[in-house]
Amino acid sequence: MGPQFGRRLRKGAATTAVAAAAVAALSASQAPGVTTDADGRQATTGAQPSPDAYAEDSATGNSPYYTDLPPLNSPTPSPSTGTTPPVTGEAQAGIPATVLDAYKKAATRLRESKPGCNLPWELLAAIGKVESGHARGGNVAANGTTLSPIRGPQLNGNGFANISDTDNGLYDGDSSYDRAVGPMQFIPSTWSWAGRDGNGDGVEDPNNVYDAALAAGHYLCRFGWDLSTQADLNRAILSYNNSSDYLNTVLSWLEYYRKGTHEVPDGTGSLPGNRSDDPAGASPSPTPPAASDRPGSESPSATPKPTPTPPASGGGSASPSPTPPGTTTPPPPTPTETVHHLEDAGTATLTAMAGDTFGERISTRAETKDGTAVGKVRVRFTITGSTDATFSTGETVATVVTGSAGIAVAPALQAGEKTGDFTVRATVVGRTLPGLDYGAAVTARAADTLTRVGDTALTCVTGGEFAERIQLKAAYKGAVADGVAATATLIKSADDPTANDQGPYFKDADDTAVRTLSLKTDADGLLKLPQLYADDTAGTFLLRVTTTGGATLTLELTVTAPEPTPSPSDSTGETASPSASPSA
């Protein structure tokens, strides 16, 4: 929920040490601002919410959240909290077992896949607490799926962001407008690209706490942020929900959980009671949350506040002229509403070798029906197809705002290891216009040059082994060619590249002679061949090495017969006659 909506913090909570620490962190942040960086992302440059951030690009669509702050670790009730004693710090520190397990496993996987992010599991716990009260007190099955849906209010612009339906009700059960869904409260449009399978069942389900926690971790780490730094931590949290109060609340729970927490049985976690869409200034209720706010129920939509009539200009007492009854002035169309279609803005062929960055970036122009460029329009680029390619951000989706020339340039594409064709689709965020597809291809790693390391003659006697271990260096356009597939074959002749059946050979794991090997260059472009052996055939032989990309090198191997053993000589230097064989 953005900062313009009413909030209610528990009375006295703002004076706690935890809240003070969070406020101090906020006050140390930079001033707000919006930029579009080399990765095509629009993000605040400081640690304040940005008025230019779009709800559709956040995890939650800026939906309502729980505003309860952590209590002091004291058994003494605060007199300002009403007649019902608050839950003590020890009980509030408890996290339902399955939910806690999901947070920790997600953080462990992020440490492996994105170690530079430094995501603490306590941050996932803080967000999970604020978004859903840890899946409404751990109301989940053993596999982590909520026992009943957790859905936010309809995002229909009536006191909330206006996000029309993007999933035909698939996730949120609403075919008119989107709603935040599940323990981490993802809106469907964000889940469509941020969703992850956290429990290995082959399904990406926002209602499953393992899936949702892993998706939240990737979402928070998606821009290469280092969450061990305060500025990046604040940016990541604000990208989840663009509100300074939200940031304050999450930071408070983060520090609280860092001081210690423990596991409690599923279904027994403490339930928060105050939400950001409650009437501002209302007193906390000592009674349990209403049925609509309990686990498995939908949250009610907030009632919009009336807009006060502004005073007359100049401070005079005259009232503005009333609008004639039945007359309305339609608002001017937004830039997005004027877009008729997307056009390619000169994108060249999109081809890269596995592991490389594409040299060409996708460029798309938003235009009106008559071809006029439209600026300030969000264009979403989505990678589709059977590929492991990503954008330079590490994600398969990127949203870029068009400039004054109506052009949005996607972040650079990064090829994975999977070869083949895929598609990048450009669409206008907030419209149901036809998308614009760009074909891209990933080819196998290649080398165009092979050179031998060293120049020692490759010789051996029959029945022996070659003293020199062959090493080759592969390059592509002068650069190191790493990870390139190669084949080494002991061929019959320069004109017959089939494998020889005699002469030098390699050995396999069973010590069996083999004369063809499949290899791959290392990170330095080196191709290190295994030991070569010689059978009892003397002569000159050829070893040919070829790589993907066409690099070929043929080496000559020489196998000689051993020198004859000299016969015994007498003292005069003459060779003694052989002794007669003994008689039978």
Image (cartoon, rainbow, N blue to C red):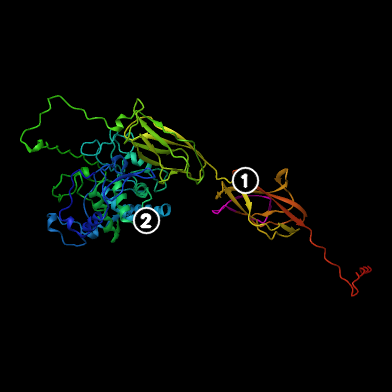
Residue 382 as seen in the image, left or right of residue 349: left
Badge number at residue 118: 2
Which residue appears farthest toward the front when viewing the image? 314
Residue 252: image location, x then y, percent = 25, 55
Q: Which residues are magenta?
A: 509-526
Residue 3 as seen in the image, left or right of residue 436: left
Residue 470 as seen in the image, left or right of residue 36: right
Q: Is residue 151 above or below residue 272?
A: above
Badge number at residue 551: 1
Residue 339: image location, x then y, percent = 33, 30
Indicate whether residue 524 is drawn in magenta: yes
What element does badge 1 sit on?
loop
Q: Is residue 158 above or below residue 45?
A: above
For badge 2, the amino acid type reads Asn
Can residue 266 be seen here? The reply is no
Total marks drawn? 2
Which quarter of the rendered picture does the N terminus lie within? top left
For badge 1, the amino acid type reads Ala
| Residue visible at 21% across and 36% down in the picture | 158
Depth check, front residue: 14 or 203: 14
Disc 1 to disc 2, C-alpha distance: 42 Å
Q: Earlier in the sequence, mark 1 or mark 2?
A: 2
Which quarter of the rendered picture does the C terminus lie within? bottom right
What element does badge 2 sit on?
loop
